[in-house]
Image: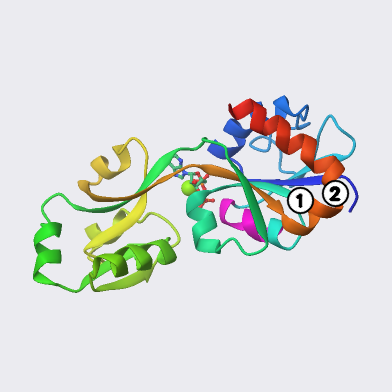
């Protein structure tokens, strides 16, 4: 496909991405929250946006179905980043990855005892690495959503999840017991496209870089 295809997800990333695209002279023709279209044109005839699930963005870019994409560091770590060039931290959709447990659970004591903990998470790769580095024995339980429910329902002792304000944890009587890393969204570029379509892509990347400084 000639021209540029950009993979974006709906929600907070899309909203925070709009000003960055505008700085590169790219304005989507429709709001994906209102439209059911999955391919959205822009003010530029040679630029289109594809709307995908947040965790699918790296896959579209890896295989060249999109030239550019914007994805959270959380998603990129789980994907592994194969075939992706990651030139820019966009400093948007900021939050942190943390371990959270019910308010009454003494996580630190359980770790000291060497207890084997059940950890429910969508972020298996990050969680595995985190607990391995600490030497904590865990059984990782893969979930696809609402991690907060797992400790309340007795599925796990703790969760690994993203937190920004902390209000969802609080509403479910969970507390953050460990911070794992800061998360923000990154620009990802297909490595082959960067060579073949350099004349088209480089100005867009440079304009986005200018807009985040
Ligand atoms: P879906 O909602 O379709 O299951 P998702 O949960 O991965 O997918 P979003 O909730 O839109 O999608 O999150 C997209 C990205 O936004 C995440 O990958 C992460 O980088 C970032 N993010 C998620 N939760 C938060 C949060 N609480 N605060 C700030 N950024 C967040
Ligand atoms: Mg979500």
- Residue at 23% across, 73% down: 137
Q: Residue 75: image x %, image y %?
A: 52, 55
Query: Which numbered disc covers residue 197?
Result: 2
Judging by the rendered image, the residue that carries numbered circle 1 is 67
The C terminus - image quarter: top right
Of residues 49 and 131, which is closer to you in this image? Answer: 131
Sooner in the amino-acid sequence: mark 2 or mark 1: 1
Q: Position of residue 175 (x, y in %)?
A: 21, 46
Q: Is mark 2 within 8 Å of ligand 1?
A: no
Going by the image, does 117 lie left or right of 194? left
Span of residues in magenta: 54-60
Ligand 1 under 8 Å from disc 1 Cβ: no
- Taking the spot 29% from the left edge, 61% from the top edge, the residue there is 150
Residue 42 percent across, percent down from the top left: 81, 34
Q: Which of 37 and 71 is in front in this view?
A: 71
Kindly check if marks 2 and 1 are in contact, taking CB atoms under 8 A apart as contact.
Answer: yes
Q: Residue 99: which numbered mark, if any? A: none
């Amino acid at each position: 496909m000639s021209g540029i295809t950009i993979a974006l997800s709906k929600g907070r990333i899309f909203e925070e991405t709009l000003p960055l695209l505008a700085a590169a002279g790219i304005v989507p023709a429709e709001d994906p929250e209102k439209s059911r279209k999955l391919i959205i044109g822009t003010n530029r005839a040679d630029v289109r946006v594809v709307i995908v699930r947040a965790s699918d963005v790296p896959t579209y870019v890896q295989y060249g179905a999109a030239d550019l994409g914007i994805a959270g560091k959380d998603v990129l770590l789980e994907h592994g980043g194969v075939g992706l060039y990651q030139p820019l931290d966009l400093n948007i959709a900021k939050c942190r990855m943390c371990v959270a447990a019910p308010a009454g659970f003494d996580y630190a004591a359980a770790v000291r005892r060497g207890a084997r903990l059940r950890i429910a998470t969508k972020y298996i790769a990050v969680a595995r690495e985190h607990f391995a580095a600490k030497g904590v024995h865990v059984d990782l339980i893969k979930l696809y959503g609402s991690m907060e429910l797992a400790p309340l329902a007795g599925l796990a002792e703790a969760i690994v999840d993203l937190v920004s304000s902390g209000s969802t944890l609080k509403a479910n009587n969970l507390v953050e017991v460990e911070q794992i890393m800061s998360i923000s969204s990154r620009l990802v570029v297909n490595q082959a496209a960067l060579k073949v379509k350099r004349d088209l892509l480089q100005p867009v990347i440079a304009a986005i870089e200018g807009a985040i400084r």
